[in-house]
Amino acid sequence: MEALVMASGVDALASYADRPPPLNEPTRLARLMGLEDSRELDDVELARRVANGLPTTVVIAFARILGRSKVIGLMIPEATYRRLSKRGKPLSRDHSERIYEIGRILDALARVYHGDLDKMLAFLQHPHMLLGGDTPFDMARSSSAGAETVLNLILRAEAGMPV
């Protein structure tokens, strides 16, 4: 299972270097999250997985992209992550939804920046005037509405609008 996680996260960003981005959104998200059968996922199956709780391995995959301190601690309490991971239990629905929302943002950024992690992280970490001076990462993790706001900003940039 650990080898599978190592093939996810940052390594999955390489597929975004192609134009247009490969596959459908659920498959891209599943690859970013390191889910085992990412090729067979559709919207319904991904929604079910999020509702039932994603495996703790998605935390590792996202920590490889964003950095451990951005995921463990800020998005998921360390004690919760350790407890669930040790017991082989999935994340709660709430934590799974947070991961999913950040995953959608990472997917959109990877499309805009063609998988360039440095550019993606620069966007996420710098305050943005259209977000009231908040960083996109802080806005996105604040609530589902905040994540949607950041996603809309990225989609506007992808469409060629100045942001």
Image (cartoon, rainbow, N blue to C red):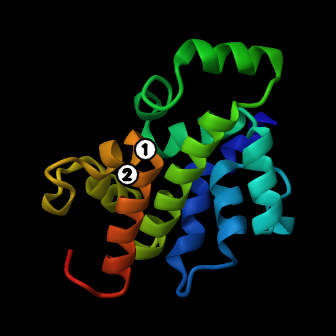
Residue appearing at x 47%, y 74% in the figure:
111
Q: Which residue is mark 2?
A: 146
Q: Residues within 10 Å of mark 1 (few under 14, many from 20)?
A: few
Answer above or below: position of 44 versus 89: below
Q: Which mark is residue 95?
A: none
**Residue at 72% in and 47% down:** 50
- Amino acid bearing label 1: Ser
Q: Which residue is pictured at 60% across the width and 71% down the height?
A: 15
Q: Tell me: residue 95, above or below residue 104.
A: above
42 vs 139, left or right, is: right
Q: Quadrant of residue 113?
A: bottom left
Q: Amino acid at mark 2?
A: Gly
- Residues marked 1 and 2 touching at CB (< 8 Å): yes
Percent across and percent down for residue 94 are 62, 36
Residue shown at 58% from the left, 12% from the top:
79
Find residue 7 and report its horizontal and vertical position in percent.
69, 50
Q: Please state, as top left, top right, bottom left or bottom right, where the C terminus lies in the image.
A: bottom left
- Mark 2 residue crowding within 10 angstroms, few (<14) / some (14–19) / many (20+): some
From the image, which quarter does the N terminus lie in? top right
Q: Which residue is mark 1?
A: 143
Q: CA distance from mark 1 to mark 2?
A: 5 Å
Q: Is residue 120 left or right of residue 115?
A: left
Using the rendered view, name the quadrant where residue 27 is placed. Answer: bottom right
Horizontal placement of 25 versus 66: left or right? Answer: right
Q: How many marks?
A: 2
| Rendering coords of residue 13 (x, y %) | 54, 62
Residue 46 visible in this rendered orientation of the protein: yes
